[in-house]
Amino acid sequence: MPERRPEPVAVGPDAAERARTVATRPAATVCAPGIQGGRVLAHTVTRDGQVLLVVSRDGDLATAVRAAPGQDLSTLLMVSDHAPVPLRCPVRAQLWLSGWATPVRPADRRTAVLAFAEQRPDPSLLDVGRTAELLRLDLAEVVLGEAGAAADVGLQEFLAARPDPLAGIEAEHLTHLAADHADVLALLAGRLPAGLLGPGDVLRPLALDRFGFRLRVERRFGHVDVRVPFPRPLTCAGQLGPAVARVLCAARAARG
């Protein structure tokens, strides 16, 4: 009987999970026929996978949707993921969600607004039906751009995935780390591959997810991103403190 080998442990999120996480970020614009970089008041992906947009009722996109045949307009939503700490290149990823935008019917509006608010309780929802319009984007294609590469994400994989459980607290933890804990960054630097951090290089926190820290080494020309993983992926935000403690304990032990 052949020897059974343990399954490899994932060291980072797959493209679908990363795409769902990027989709939670607030910075977004839309493009449609005749519209370039239109403003979105708010957007979300609901728990059951609906992509919803809040736009100004008299804005370009809502006007174009109402004028489109069948009120069905080919639309591209672009979401940008910005690092919460100062970096030379602050955009960590971009997500392109393309499909057809159509108004949410008045009979479905209340249910849609509640589903939207469950994921993102944005103040613009209070204006839906008055000065704001709620649109649904029926997805045709999902593309994730990250680290200089673009990846197609299957629609079923995207809809089945869930955002990273640390997405809502990541910014607070990274800004606190960057501003107040140079000692912790120094310990994390000890977990980098030998020779990666050279003279004159600057180490900055880039990201935090359930798989661990991502750090950026900023060099005079360009940068390098590297992951410092947790012992095992987290399943909820409550596991973050013990996981960080174990990483730092291992870093101290490696220092001797």
Image (spheres, helix red, strand yellow):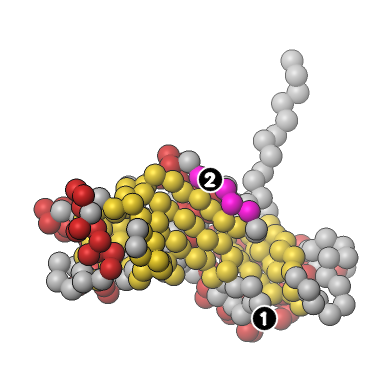
| Residue depicted at x 88% and y 65% | 195
| Residue type indicated by callout 2 | Asp
Left or right of 57 in this view: 168 = right
At mark 1, the secondary structure is loop
| Residue depicted at x 63% and y 53% | 149
> Is 132 placed above or below 106 here?
below
Q: Quadrant of the C terminus?
A: bottom right
Mark 2 or 1, nearer chain start: 2
Q: Position of residue 249 (x, y in %)?
A: 74, 65
* Residue corresponding to mark 2: 152
Q: Position of residue 193 (x, y in %)?
A: 83, 61
| Residue depicted at x 29% and y 53% | 73
| Residue type indicated by callout 1 | His
- Region of the chain picked out in magenta, as a range: 149-153
Q: Residues within 10 Å of mark 1 (few under 14, many from 20)?
A: few
* Residue corresponding to mark 1: 181
Q: Nearer the viewer, residue 174 or 109?
A: 109
Q: Residue furthest bottom?
A: 180
Left or right of 38 in this view: 136 = left
